[in-house]
Image (cartoon, rainbow, N blue to C red):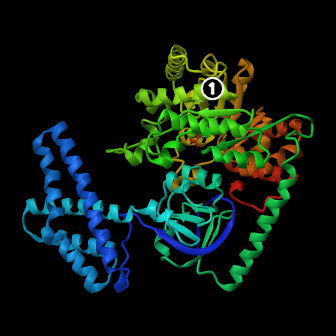
Amino acid sequence: MEVIRGIPVSSGIVFGRVFRLGKAEQRVSHRRIEATDVEKEIERVDSSFEEAISELELLRDRTRVQLGAEPAKIFEFHVGLLRDPSLRDPIRDRIRTDLVVAEWAVADQFRTIADQFAAMDSDVFTQKTADIMDLDRRVLDKLMGETTSRLANLTEPVIIVAHELTPSQTAGMDRKKVLGFATDAGGRTSHVSIVARAVDIPAVVGCRRVSRAVENGDFLIVDGDAGTVIIDPDEETISDYQARQSKVSEFREGLRETVGLESVTSDGETVTLLGNIEFPDEIDSVLANGGAGVGLYRTEFLYLTTGHAPDEQAHLDAYRQAIRMLDGRPLVIRTQDLGADKYTQEQAEEPERNPFLGCRSIRYSLQNLPEFKLQLRAILRAAADGPVKVMFPLVSTVMEIRQAKMILADVAEELDEDGIERGTDVRIGMMVEVPSAALMARAFSNEVEFFSIGTNDLIQYTLAVDRGNERVAGLYTGANPAVIQLIKSVIRVARRRDVDVSLCGEIAGEPIYTMLLLGLGLRTLSLVPSQIPLIKKVVRSVSITHCERIARKVGTFDSERQVLNYLRDELRKIDPGSPGGWTAE
Ligand code: PEP
Ligand code: MG
């Protein structure tokens, strides 16, 4: 039995067998196959070579057009190598005679050739070693990059273990087949973690070495509340966790009683609890958990699940579905937040060096106007059917919001000219998730009708801590006094300037922060639907006067430790009865 600690990101305890998802850079394991599988493995080799060749030919042609014939020769050389039977034949032979998986045979053959080149006493050949290793990665990527289809074709329930997952892989997981997952990389608010919570799959990320510690078929326990992964648990541990599992379900069941109750504090203040969604289907869960509407619809997931940019009709269908399901309740549609760890990096020919500081969100939209306008057209058209607000993400300068508004106005005008029906009362808001926007809230208050504070990004940009990097996860916390000061000042400006303000970062769903956020003046929170009952329970147990006292006290602390200890103690006093979990910091 081995216990690995990671970051708990999605609640629940699960037991099951490991299904490892590989990545080309990871260790290729020497797995043996049955003789009956030989032809299947050879076919996999052939199709991965063919796929790699087509990709290289495309690169060659593009390079020839953009840079000329000479640089294109490198890809010609790569294509030639992959077509050379003296490379592929030994791989096929290896599978036939040694009965090994395709990945192993490919990696081994490339290694042999690279060693031969490296041994030749010539610079030219030594350089070829890098070419060979590059090709090795490309072919292995094709072989092992079948992850999405492997995920789609699971035949029995498993626990996924991987070095890293993408948000789209997570979004595509079938809840019946994927019991839970554990990854080496990731943080509490990486988009993979957010999606895990949205689709309610227990998960632990940031385990650093879990993918190297397990083999396919190992028995695992994943505890998404405590953040532990237990490999090969003994009998006693299994029964201990079974007991915990039923306690968690009992606790969740008990919370159901709050669903029909009003979200109001003991001194009569209404606190509106909205849901964050990635797909319209999640609205079922928002409503079932007692949410009053949708405060954040992350529309970029339309791109992530299909792998390509949706057309206007696809946007429109999704928004109309959301409006229909909400039946008159509010819907905040956030325009595409592409870039960073989402979509564009996976597709990019040349990934950005610092994608979180790069061409992300509104910056991407403003650089890809046809795509942006198409989305805005769909939002305005859908708004004819129900109450829709539009929100722009990652705004960092006043010019950006002015430009975005101008484009929205253009789109409205075009629709009117074409006689296409559209909503005429679409309120415009922005995410406040970059320190520059928080600091300049007053200037922005002249531009928009509402602010939504996005702490997931505000924390990372204020503290210079990558939200998805497990190595600095200890520094990533909303309890940092600098972050709290920014939140406080945005709320103050919004109230003075009569701009609506809410908060939609993950801390909105973490009970430890609820009293602080109410005390700072927030009356609307948007959060992961499954947490709505728990947060409502906290809301109903506290008074605003008490929360304001708490916020004042927190304002006197200068370290996140003090803040967290204090908030934890205060939460314990009202005892919302959490079994402990990812929400407990
Ligand atoms: C945020 O940054 O707090 C937020 C809600 O947006 P996202 O998590 O999609 O970046
Ligand atoms: Mg954000």
Quarter of the image for residue 550 reads top right
Counting from the top left corner in percent of width and height, residue 325 is at: 70, 40
Q: Which residue is mark 1?
A: 429
Q: Toward which corner of the image does residue 145 lie, by quadrant?
A: bottom left
Residue drawn at x 50%, y 23% is 400
Numbered label tally? 1
Where does residue 298 sit, x and y in percent of width and height? 58, 40
Residue sitting at the far left? 122
- Residue reaching furthest to the right: 267
Quarter of the image where the C terminus is located: bottom right
Please name the amino acid that badge 1 sits on.
Answer: Gly
Q: Which secondary structure lies at badge 1? A: strand
Instruction: Give the farthest residue toward the front.
Output: 419
In front of the other: 465 or 576:
576
Q: Is residue 261 left or right of residue 422?
A: right
**Residue 376 in the image, given as x and y percentages of width and height:** 53, 27
Of the pair 568 and 296, the residue shown nearer to us: 296
In the shown orientation, is residue 440 left or right of residue 116? right
Q: For the N terminus, give its image quadrant.
A: bottom right
- Looking at the image, residue 143 lies above or below residue 190: below
Horizontal and vertical percent for residue 323?
67, 35
Which class describes the residues within 10 Å of circle 1: few (<14), some (14-19), or many (20+)? many
* Residue 438 shows up from this direction: no
Using the image, determine if residue 104 lies above or below residue 21. Answer: below
Tell me the quarter of the picture where residue 584 sits: bottom right
Image check: 420 left or right of 142?
Answer: right
The answer to whether residue 311 of the structure is visible from this angle is yes
Nearer to me, 114 or 470 = 114
